Image (cartoon, rainbow, N blue to C red):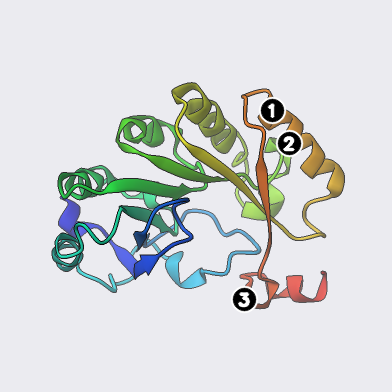
């Protein structure tokens, strides 16, 4: 049930997390990857105590109808929780659009969610073969690129983002990623500078 959604954080108002919409952001607890530049390390443990009660958040959102346009599920990795689908349905019942921030770890789960999503922010971290050097997980590069294909085929409103540390991602790799995205009809890649001061791998502070 959605009331068991594990929540590590909540932002009641933002104008930057869903393009063109005023939104609230639910930060879902847990992620199976340990990306070296991750700056939300407190959201990584899947079984950490939930910082917020989902029912209370629903009550808050019900009181913001007409003031907010959308709810964004972020993380962590929101698709790591099977209860996300029910939570999204409850948000839509309140009349909100739904956005999703995801690293594309679970393509099958994302496929089920796509019809309920109004916008997706997808993190692409590298070319498939270079993912393990960032995530620490062997074979982690295939799923995100499968999600690129799924979202492109569904024509879901999409922003593809890449967090870049100069020692982890070269100019040539960024160029190749852009070329690969264009094969799916995605012509823009948003490149973001990583926050190395709060990176999970603190050696990155000395490598930039």
> At numbered mark 3, what does the secondary structure look like: helix, strand or loop?
helix
Considering only vertical position in the picture, is 137 above or below 110? below
Comparing 165 with 100, the one in front is 100
Q: Residue at x 64, y 71 (%)?
A: 199
Q: Residue at x 61, y 39 (%)?
A: 139
Disc 2 versus disc 3: distance between alpha carbons? 27 Å
Q: Residue at x 41, y 47 (%)?
A: 100
Answer with left or right where residue 8 lies relative to residue 124.
Answer: left
Q: Position of residue 52 (x, y in %)?
A: 25, 71
Comparing 76 with 150, the one in front is 150
Q: Position of residue 19 (x, y in %)?
A: 47, 51
Determine contact: label 1, label 2, CB under 8 Å.
Answer: yes
Identify the residue position indicated by label 2 in the image: 178
> At numbered mark 1, what does the secondary structure look like: helix, strand or loop?
helix
Q: Position of residue 105 (x, y in %)?
A: 49, 42
* Labels in figure, total: 3
Comparing 47 with 39, the one in front is 39
Dot placed on the residue nearer the N-terminal end, 2 or 3: 2
């Amino acid at each position: 049930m959605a009331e068991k959604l594990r929540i590590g954080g909540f932002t009641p108002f933002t104008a930057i997390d869903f393009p063109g919409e005023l939104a609230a952001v639910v930060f879902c607890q847990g992620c199976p990857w340990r990306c070296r530049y991750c700056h939300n390390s407190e959201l990584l443990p899947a079984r950490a105590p939930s910082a917020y009660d989902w029912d209370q958040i629903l009550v808050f959102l019900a009181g913001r109808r007409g003031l907010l346009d959308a709810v964004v599920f972020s993380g962590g990795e929101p698709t790591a929780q099977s209860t996300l689908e029910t939570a999204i349905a409850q948000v839509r019942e309140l009349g909100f659009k739904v956005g999703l921030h995801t690293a594309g770890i679970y393509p099958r789960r994302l496929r089920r969610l796509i019809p309920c999503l109004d916008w997706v922010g997808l993190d692409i971290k590298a070319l498939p073969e270079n993912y393990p050097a960032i995530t620490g997980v062997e074979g982690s590069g295939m799923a995100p690129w499968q999600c690129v294909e799924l979202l492109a085929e569904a024509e879901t409103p999409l922003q593809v983002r890449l967090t870049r540390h100069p020692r982890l991602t070269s100019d040539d790799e960024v160029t190749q990623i852009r070329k690969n995205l264009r094969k799916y009809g995605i012509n823009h890649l948003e490149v973001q500078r990583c926050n190395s001061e709060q990176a999970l791998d603190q050696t990155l502070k000395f490598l930039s």
